[in-house]
Image (cartoon, rainbow, N blue to C red):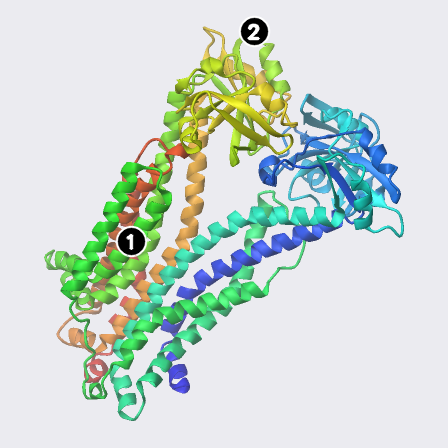
Amino acid sequence: MLRVSLRNLLVSKLRLFLTIMAVTVGVTFVSGTFVLSDTMVKAFGELYAGLTSGTDVVVRSEAAYAADLAATGGQVRPLDESLVAKVGEVPGVAVAEGSVFGFALVLDEDGEPMQPGGAPTLGTSLTDDPRLAGAATFRKGRTPSGIHEMALDARTVKQAGYEIGDSVDVVLRDGRRSFWLVGIIGFGETDSLLGATLAGFDLPTAQKVLGKVGVVDEVDVMAEGGVSASELRDRVAEILPEDVEVLTGEQVAEDGTASVRDSMGAFTTIMLVFAGVSVVVGSFVIWNTFNVLVAQRRREVALLRAVGATRRQVLKGVLLEAAAIGLVSGAIGLALGVALAAGIRSLLELIGVEMPTTSPAVEPRTVMAALAVGLLVTLVAAIAPAWAATRVSPMEALRNAVPAGGPVSRARRLAGWGVIGAGIAALAVCAVVGNQRWATVFATLITFVGLVVAGPTLTRGMARLADHGPRGGGWRLAARNIARNSRRAAASALALTIGLTVVAAVTVTATSLKESVSEAVSGGNRSDLILEPAGAGLGISPSVADVLRARKDVADVVELRESAAQVDGRSALVTAMDTDGLDRVIDLGIQGGSLDALEPGSILISTTAAEDLGVRVGDTVTVTFPETGDIALTIGGTFNKGSLINTNYLMTIPDFTANVTAPLDGAILMNSTSGTDPAQAKAAIEAALVDYPNVTVNDPSDITQKAQDSVDQLLGIVTAMLLLAIVVAILGIVNTLVLSVVERTRELGLLRAVGGTRRQVRTVVRRESVLISLLGAVTGIALGLVTGIALSRSLVAEGVSTLAVPTLSLLTYLVIAAAVGVLAAIGPARRASKVDILRAIASE
């Protein structure tokens, strides 16, 4: 049976190629995701190990809770500088130096901000002792000394066009300053840290320009010879206060690597979701392919049974074919996954996110996952066709015809429509109730199961509609062909349905989000201008607000700051705003309490957050900041608007500043004085902030457009990811048509013999493809529309307050699906038109 199975595989190389590709796409996604994630973790693990190689012990404040490094920027509560000398006196300490870091935005020679890919713009102190620097070394120049000198990372120097001795402008928390470039820093073979700009100063200068005079963020310690890092850690720990921790350099490197691994977790999950969609689509293609193959080989299987083959041997033979396809797909997908990971990494570098140099990490888990996905998908998909093959009677060897698909039982029709009805009803309930994300996903899956069960019925219904259409053009013959084997056509269509369901649902949700943003700006915003960091910048210097307040044409200036925190033990994003003029720049939609109650010691909470926490006006909540720990705040009011600022928790600037040591503004909302022309006001503010090129001045229409452009960009990325799943579905349609042409060789020959032209044959095959594509498109768009409505309603708490249906986009998908049907049929139609008439008629 092994020899027979291998021979059957090689009978049609085109069919083998299409089948393998259907599984390979999903496997490539899976393996590429794991390879990229593991490679990045490995690269940064090596980089962190290099950077901490000269540091045996690190002393820093202990975080109040395990906060996400990406959310907090790694900021910790500063330590008193006197602790450096105290640590230096511990026996076994060879060197102890304090260091600080913070916001420093480097400008290029033209005065444009250096913000590659939205990476951090860091300012830091540089060690006096090169032994503590680890992998960070000076490629040119020397260590800066004094208030007028600085060093830059090699990547920023190259991109900005600087050389040693040039004057470099830097935007700091207290404004713009100029420094002389005296050193260029590299990190092993890498020019930067994850694409971040790094402005380095000596410690006194860094403390002054970063606003940390008299304090340090951490103390870096090197041990004397013969003293281990763990031993020195224990000695240093004995002299430290309770809220200060001491770690070995190896532990710090492991923490850094763990943060990279955690940050890659969300990316890995998202990519695996897309991979799962492709894998499911591929499984439909495999199932359909083996169904057709078993139908075409009924006489061959019957002959095997007649000469003594057992049912187990027949089952084993079909599953061996599936296993061979799965293993080959897994191997190819693994190789392509490594290439995909390299491609994504190169793409990240193109947008400014530089990766440390290292070899691709292909872990045993990745190899096992690739082979397992390829093998299991094909085996599971082939089980039902293989089992059907075992039921072929030896008497089938006496029959010449390939049986068409049998009628769909009434029980299956009722079950299918019943499940569809239950799924649609559940989606309707989710849409009415709202905030039911997982229930929406579950209801969508139920509905799709119903489509699978009722698929043949839907196919026959579409065939009847086409059969009653125009007599010309091959539509009737095409309709009867797909109705003759409705199961096969339904399987091909449903593979396309999966991809289009997700695309349509995402499109509806994205359109609703865009409309919600527009409504939030027009309904909640009262400010004339909104200032934001350019690109994906981390913040605005507070000195910008001082510049605005000093102007006579500015009436209100309200700063906005954000930080990761916990509220009653739940992770949250906390926002702080000035209370003076707050009601004049934004309408929060106060529901309970009063806006006047927002003062130091109090907090405003959205109605959604209040419901989740089970609190009301007058109650106390505990806000935990990573740097300072718990503070108790009284709820002064609740609000249900303000999606413009995208927050559930609003506190005062004084409370925020007391607990967050990086006082950068996330945005500034301002109003001009009465009678000021809006266009002139915008131009005047832009001119006044010429020293802050990282600040963009926006009117409400600009904010709306930016938000909508971001949604469009996200929609484009998601659609591009799902496009691969749709490509797999198209391969399935092509595969089905190719196998169908082979199956109908004699029929096509007879059609030609009674006067059918090659063009007419091609037309019939194309019409079949279009009908299959339209069936998949209609069901996918319909299910995606209902799912998108329910999903939009489930995201009300995240700011999706308006429901919008993109009718034009959905109709465009339908037209594209019809065009896809035409394109998918090009090869099979040409093959059908070239059937040899005499040989086809003579075939048995």
- Viewer-proximal residue among 651 and 160: 651
Residue 248: x percent and y percent?
A: 76, 47
What kind of residue is marked 1?
A: Ile
- Image quadrant in which you'd find residue 452: bottom left
- Image quadrant in which you'd find residue 758: bottom left
Quadrant of the image for the C terminus?
Answer: bottom left
Left or right, residue 420 beside residue 161: left
Left or right, residue 486 beside residue 580: left
Crowdedness of circle 1 by 10 Å Cα count: few (<14), some, many (20+)? many
- Viewer-proximal residue among 703 and 367: 367
Q: Which residue is mark 1?
A: 446
Q: Earlier in the sequence, mark 2 or mark 1?
A: 1
Q: Which residue is mark 2?
A: 552
Residue 659: x percent and y percent?
A: 63, 26
Q: SS at mark 1?
A: helix
Quadrant of the image for the N terminus?
Answer: bottom left
- Taking 460 as reference, is 58 above or below it? above
Q: Count of labels shown? A: 2
- Labelled disc at residue 2: none
What kind of residue is marked 2?
A: Lys
Res 704 visible: yes
- Taking 29 as reference, is 77 above or below it? above
Question: What residue lies at 25% left-to-right and 59% top-to-bottom?
Answer: 772
Q: Could you give the CA–CA distance between mark 2 and mark 1, rounded to whole angstroms?
A: 63 Å
Residue 27: x percent and y percent?
A: 47, 63
- Viewer-proximal residue among 836 and 529: 529
Res 142 visible: no
- Taking 666 as reference, is 190 above or below it? below
Left or right, residue 418 beside residue 9: left
Crowdedness of circle 2 by 10 Å Cα count: few (<14), some, many (20+)? few
- Taking 180 as reference, is 557 above or below it? above
